[in-house]
Image: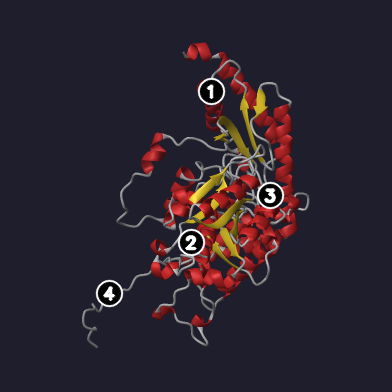
Amino acid sequence: MDAMPGHSATSTEETLDPSDWADVQSLSHRIVDDAVAYLRDVRQRPVWQEMPGDVRDFFTASLPQSPTPLADIYGDVVDKVMPYPMGNIHPRFWSWYMGSSNFTGAIGDFLAAIQGSNLGGGNHAAALMDGQVVDWCKQMMGMPASASGTLVSGGSMANIIGLTVARNTKAGIDVREHGVGAIEKPLRFYGSDQVHSCHRKGMEALGLGNKALRRIASDAGLRIDIEGLRTAISEDRAAGFKPACIIGNAGTVNTGAIDDLQALAKLAHEEDLWFHVDGCIGALIAIAPENAHRVAGIEWADSIALDPHKWLHAPFEAGCALVRDASAHRKTFAVTPEYLESTPRGLASGQWLHDYGLQTSRGFKALKVWMALREHGVEKFGRLIDQNIAQGQYLSGLIAAEPALELTAPTSINIVCFRYRADGLDGERAKALNTEIMLRLQEDGTAAISDTTVQGRHCLRVAINNHRTRREDLDLLVAETVRLGNEIASARPAMG
């Protein structure tokens, strides 16, 4: 028989599947063994280490044109990637507010990638699990079963989802059809001066501009001033603006301060404003038996942003946006093109999950969260949150008892702001000394902490969002901070 037109009789069609599954299976077993050892022995490795020049150069290689054996590729990963992580799975990583992952979640990510489902929606098991994890998040927050929600990349996107629904609901016009230029009175959103930077990005992305977000002064506890907020709303109305949304902090990123969510919910109701809670730091305190009272009122929010990749320790990335009014949520994002119409049966008969956010293509984030919650139960995650908050209080006590150190902000939950006293040094030189302490702790591989500025004072910042941290790790941090501070301060004349 003659070959089909345009095809050679000897041509073969290609695939990305391996030619020898047995070899891949053997290598995969080795990879899993290495992965178990990597987590098991994490405490024996530096928190972080600088990459040598040859490792940096390795990542400048040009686009590969021809094949490389998978075993060789894995060897490069072992040598060039695994020894140089950000460090957030290490028990002494406290730089930024990140969860520290878990092995079961990592297995979930692997299986999700193997199954390969696109969570834009449809009638399949992964889509049902996605909805189930959202339902579990609603239960954790005390939101009604009728509420809506969506899994997203993280807190920034979860906040933007909530703020977008708030904008569209309060605009007074069809923003999707006519755009923000048709809004009769400029909208005003309100948050404290401690609000996360993603809210500015949100205002800009929503076409409202940074000035639409009015920052209200915080009190001595770094919580939003309720009376100041009430006054600002009244002033804006009188000036021709339309107050639209109050953003409450269930934990600020700088210090972990929690706004009075009950008072904010009451004020939003009185003023007919949307009440959005940025709970990416502390919303999940709602499941912590000893500390849940700190976020009382979060269940009254119109929308909530939270992060399973923080205190549920899901591997990156996993965020969640919840919206009380499911209809308002869907109306903000739903589009039905002709190629994504529902059918009465079959694959397209399931819910279209892309109707609740900006992504049509969505990864299978739910499995890693679902598996870990099934394995440990939500009560254990609540206890781990209480454990971190107790560790924050423990560290604060160590600092208060150490003459060389001082707390620079109240410790509300598990974020501790402090500094080496640096007596006799002005602001900039004190900042330089404390920054040097931070950098040496990182470079020595001892601990990863960050720095910030709170109410004009530079300080070091420890965010304990880590299920592997133990109190002896905090003892070591204080001892090394004092040792390094003394060493650097005594070398000041030589430093010029």
Mark 3 lies on a secondary structure that is loop
Q: Which mark is residue 427?
A: 1
Q: In this picture, is 478 found above or below 357?
A: above
Quadrant of res 103? bottom right
Q: Earlier in the sequence, mark 1 or mark 3?
A: 3
Q: Residues within 10 Å of mark 4 (few under 14, many from 20)?
A: few
* Residue 231 position in % (x across, y down): 60, 48
Q: CA distance from mark 4 to mark 2?
A: 26 Å
Residue 493 is at least partly visible in this image: yes
Q: Which mark is residue 11?
A: 4
Q: Which sits in the foreground, 85 or 289?
A: 289
Mark 4 lies on a secondary structure that is loop
Q: Residues within 10 Å of mark 2 (few under 14, many from 20)?
A: some
Q: Which residue is mark 2?
A: 24
Q: CA distance from mark 2 to mark 3?
A: 55 Å
Q: Which residue is mark 3?
A: 260
Quadrant of the image containing the N terminus: bottom left
Mark 1 lies on a secondary structure that is helix
Mark 2 lies on a secondary structure that is helix
Residue type beneath disc 3: Asp
Report if the CB atoms under discs 4 and 1 are less than 8 Å apart. no
Q: Earlier in the sequence, mark 2 or mark 3?
A: 2
Q: Earlier in the sequence, mark 4 or mark 2?
A: 4
